[in-house]
Image (spheres, rainbow, N blue to C red):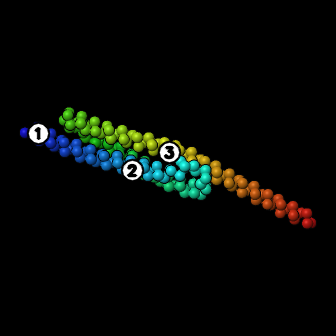
Amino acid sequence: MIAAMKEKSEKMIIDGIMRETEDRVKEAECSISKVTIAEQPFLEGFEDISVEEANKLLTELDSAVQVAHSAVGGAKTFLAMKRLAAKRLSETSAMTAADELTSLQLRLDAVAKKMSETKKRMAEWKMTTVKREAEGKVTLAEQQVQQAMEATRAVTTDV
């Protein structure tokens, strides 16, 4: 009787642990899907996007990455805490919880990997955008110098 009650109690604890952890992992997965949506314009060829638009899109992407980073970090911490809590249960219950938590950990690791890859690509896109912006400014300066030279020639030939 007591063993059955303890088993039932531990099953309820495991169900709660799994439900809460699943919610955290889903939150991280949802945040990474928002990152994927935010990076889509860059994956489709951002060379055609104006520098101003690219900067705006990069800011939005950076914001989505920060939210995802927080969600993934929080989920990792939460999962680790629940893994410790599961160890306090009976051996059978602890093994069941550990197996389920491991599957959630694998999903979370996949999300973290996607986020890491996106951060690397984002750094490259930022660098490319800065280069494009600098090239645009250099071109504008060269045009202004050329216009100034032509204006100076016109003034000096008139004199």
Nearer the N terminus, badge 1 or badge 3?
A: 1
Residue furthest front as drawn: 44
Q: Is residue 59 left or right of residue 15?
A: right
- The kind of residue on which mark 2 rests is Cys
Q: Position of residue 14 (x, y in %)?
A: 22, 42
Image mark for residue 4: 1
Does dot 1 land on a helix, a strand or a loop? helix
Residue 82 on image: x %, y %:
28, 42
**Which residue is more in the foreground, 44 or 134?**
44
Q: Quadrant of residue 79?
A: top left
Q: Secondary structure at mark 3?
A: helix
Reading the image, the residue beneath label 2 is 30
Task: Quadrant for residue 157, please give it.
Answer: bottom right
Residue 119, labelled with which disc?
Answer: 3
Alpha carbons under labels 3 and 2: distance apart:
17 Å
Residue 66 is at least partly visible in this image: no
Judge from the rendering whether residue 54 lies leftward or rightward of residue 26; answer left or right: right
Quadrant (top left/top right/bottom left/bottom right) for the C terminus: bottom right
Please state the horizontal and vertical placement of residue 51, each as a whole percent of the image. Answer: 61, 55
Q: Amino acid at mark 3?
A: Lys
How much space separates mark 1 and mark 2, taking CA atoms? Answer: 38 Å
